């Protein structure tokens, strides 16, 4: 990259590229490439000025070396852009808005009166058509108010007022359309996969880890149980069950066989498959999400729905107020002043803007929220339920000991366990894989098909022997495995302070892997802070033994805990709390947490957990710190306070305008101007930062 440093301070550089112009695609490419660098904290590219503002961490020399090596060709090969650009959307609407303002200014300054009058009559036709459509459908809606007020102004030869009202209405419609499309685009982007690499099957049958940007239609990729489908395609080999909740909302997994279509963003729950790619990255997923959002109302919060409903219900009252003013005063101007005011614009525009602003702010805190409905659930919640492993405990537990049974070798048992566990990115599985890597215990895939059993365990076959690994409940109760009789005392002496994975071969215990899983340092303080924010009950669920669970519960200070629970038990427990009338949040990170995440009013997944948990969850938080739960709670509560304040302002201010118009204090043009200015003001306030974020950062 050829660029000059315009300004520099510690950890921040402003660059200007040495090229005459920059396209929108180049700006998107560069910004995405910069955000993908390990040293990048924030990056913004401004295509008009060709400037780059970069905030980084680490050594300055490394940053400059990476920037010097950047080429557009390498970026095209390594970066995958979505099929739709938010930057392009913004540019298009900015140009439309600028064009309308300039056209209005030119008309007012240079066109003679008769021409402006003719222009007003011509412009009123679309508004009149919409008003007549409402009459034909026998509905009194805001379009009818607009048409009536414009028509009356034109009939009174008040072309200035008619033109001003139409201009303000067109600007409002443009801003509303821009806001809606931007909202959908931002939400779709937050739901996008961000998958960097896939297992590509070559012509020779080998599997190669390949950047997703290099995958083309016709290529074949391998997806295993627990993995997210990275691209749209058709099943070429294998039979799988797919969870499509992230796209269709279906709670029941769907069976897929060769020839069946699978879609990016769905998750393979069982089985393994080879997928023939039909669409390159970014081409199909975005459109599906946009269609889902536009088709479904599930993303809309109850507050947004109430606002839209209230706006439509108030239109007849505005119309009645105008008629009443005319009947009492016999003054058309006063009636017109009332008619110029409606509650619809502010209510319908400000509420979604407030929700969108909160979702964006949450994104800045590394929290992804899939809709306003779930922010409202977080604000109302009185109970929060945590999975223990990888959520309340550190995301990177360590293997403390491997204790073999039946005369087997410790290293061989660890190697076998790692071979099975590497397919399931749960924190305890990661610990086993990492310990094998640390000891230099490499392995080849010498087992047959890996099967995840939804009861805390994995099963496979190795050299004709049935191998199982999982919790004590899974191994001894569900699978009926036994302990070598001569080693009962050894088993009874296992250290109770550790979580344990049990490995059995052909029904006999072969090894116990002890996992040191220390709790997060911030967990106790986070739980205390959540109680201070109105959370009445905190619960921990774990598959550990009651003795281990009780020790951790005392350490964390949770109100209640459940030990030895299965995935179905977690979901049943959450469902029981909801039946009792509680609003429940569920926080988890593993495949076995997925049923409970679906059952809760809002499911919250940790970002480095299993793909299926992230897809099913309504909210995703980064794995770095549980303080993000506090930030999420504060943001959601601040959002609800803002929405209620917006209600009061819109009803009070517009009600005041109606009263002043009916009293003859405000003329129609002033009434329309103040109404639209109030809509703009409440919308801008809705888009401003919520005060909760700053307080949360201070606490953390």
Image: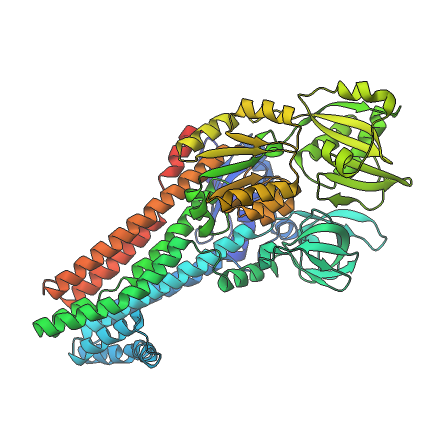
Image quarter (top left, top right, bottom left or bottom right) of the N terminus: top right
Vertical relation: 609 (above or below) 404: below
Residue 102: tell me if it is visible.
Answer: no
Residue 330, image x, y percentages: 9, 75
Residue closest to the eye, 438 or 566: 566
Residue closest to the eye, 348 or 31: 348
Is residue 91 shown left or right of residue 408? left
Residue 206, image x, y percentages: 83, 49
Image quarter (top left, top right, bottom left or bottom right) of the C terminus: top left
Residue 514: tell me if it is visible.
Answer: yes
Residue closest to the eye, 631 or 55: 631
Name the residue: 52% across, 55% down. 188
Vertical relation: 256 (above or below) 570: below
Residue 276, image x, y percentages: 75, 60
Residue 541, image x, y percentages: 59, 34
Is residue 697 shown left or right of residue 205? left
Vertical relation: 115 (above or below) 360: below
Residue farthest to the right, as pictured: 464
Vertical relation: 610 (above or below) 670: above
Name the residue: 79% across, 44% down. 450
């Amino acid at each position: 990259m050829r660029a000059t440093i315009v300004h520099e301070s510690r950890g921040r550089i402003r660059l200007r590229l040495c090229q005459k112009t920059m396209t929108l695609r180049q700006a998107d490419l560069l910004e995405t490439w910069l955000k993908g660098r390990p040293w990048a904290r924030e990056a913004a590219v401004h295509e008009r000025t060709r400037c780059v503002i970069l905030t980084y961490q680490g050594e300055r020399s490394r940053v400059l070396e990476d920037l010097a090596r950047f080429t557009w060709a390498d970026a095209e090969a390594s970066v995958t852009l979505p099929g739709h650009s938010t930057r392009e959307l913004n540019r298009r609407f900015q140009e439309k808005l600028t064009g309308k303002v300039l056209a209005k200014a030119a008309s007012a300054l240079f066109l003679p009166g008769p021409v402006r009058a003719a222009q007003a009559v011509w412009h009123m036709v679309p508004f009149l058509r919409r008003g007549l459509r409402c009459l034909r459908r026998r509905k009194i809606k805001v379009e009818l108010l607009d048409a009536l007020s414009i028509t009356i102004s034109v009939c009174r030869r008040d072309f200035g007022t008619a033109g001003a009202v139409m201009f303000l209405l067109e600007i409002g419609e443009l801003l509303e359309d821009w806001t809606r499309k931007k909202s959908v685009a931002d939400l779709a982007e937050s739901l996008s996969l961000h998958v960097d690499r896939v297992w590509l099957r070559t012509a020779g049958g080998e599997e190669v880890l390949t950047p997703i940007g290099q995958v083309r239609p016709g290529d074949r990729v391998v997806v295993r149980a627990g993995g997210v489908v990275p691209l749209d395609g058709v099943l070429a080999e294998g039979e799988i069950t797919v969870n499509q909740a992230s796209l269709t909302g279906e709670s029941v997994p769907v069976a897929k066989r060769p020839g069946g279509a699978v879609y990016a963003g769905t998750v393979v729950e069982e089985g393994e498959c080879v997928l023939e790619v039909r669409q390159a990255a970014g081409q199909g997923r975005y459109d599906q999400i946009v269609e889902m959002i536009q088709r479904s109302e599930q993303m809309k919060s109850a507050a947004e729905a109430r606002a839209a409903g209230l706006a439509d219900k108030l239109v007849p009252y505005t119309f009645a107020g105008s008629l009443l003013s005319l009947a009492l005063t016999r003054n058309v101007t006063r009636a017109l002043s009332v008619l110029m005011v409606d509650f619809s614009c502010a209510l319908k525009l400000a509420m979604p803007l407030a929700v969108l602003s909160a979702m964006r702010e949450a994104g800045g805190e590394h929290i992804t929220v899939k809709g306003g409905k779930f922010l409202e659930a977080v604000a109302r919640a009185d109970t929060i339920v945590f999975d223990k492993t990888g959520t309340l405990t550190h995301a990177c537990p360590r293997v403390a000991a491997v204790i073999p049974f039946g005369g087997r070798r410790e290293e061989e048992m660890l190697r076998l366990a790692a071979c099975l566990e590497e397919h399931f990115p749960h924190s305890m599985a990661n610990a086993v894989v990492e310990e094998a890597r640390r000891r230099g215990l490499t392995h080849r895939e010498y087992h047959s098909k890996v099967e995840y059993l939804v009861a805390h365990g994995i099963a496979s076959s190795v050299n004709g022997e049935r191998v199982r690994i999982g919790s004590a409940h899974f191994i001894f109760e569900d699978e009926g495995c036994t302990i070598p009789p001569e080693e009962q005392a050894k088993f009874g002496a296992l250290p109770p302070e550790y979580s344990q994975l049990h490995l059995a071969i052909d029904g006999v215990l072969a090894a116990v892997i002890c996992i040191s899983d220390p709790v997060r340092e911030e967990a106790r303080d986070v739980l205390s802070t959540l109680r201070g924010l109105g959370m009445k009950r905190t619960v921990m669920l774990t598959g550990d033994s009651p003795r281990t669970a009780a020790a951790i519960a005392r350490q964390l200070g949770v109100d209640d805990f459940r030990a030895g629970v299965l995935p179905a038990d977690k979901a049943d427990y959450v469902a029981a709390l909801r039946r009792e009338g509680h609003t429940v949040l569920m926080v988890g990170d593993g495949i076995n947490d997925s049923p409970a995440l679906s059952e809760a009013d809002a499911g919250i997944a940790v970002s480095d957990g299993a793909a299926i948990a992230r897809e099913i969850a309504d909210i995703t938080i980064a794995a770095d710190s549980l303080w993000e739960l506090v930030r999420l709670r504060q943001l959601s509560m601040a959002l609800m306070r803002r929405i209620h304040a917006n209600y009061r302002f819109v009803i009070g201010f517009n009600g005041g305008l109606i009263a002043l118009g009916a009293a003859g204090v405000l003329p129609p043009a002033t009434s329309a101007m103040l109404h639209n200015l109030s809509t703009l003001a409440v919308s801008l306030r809705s888009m401003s930062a919520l005060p909760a974020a700053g307080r949360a950062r201070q606490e953390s």
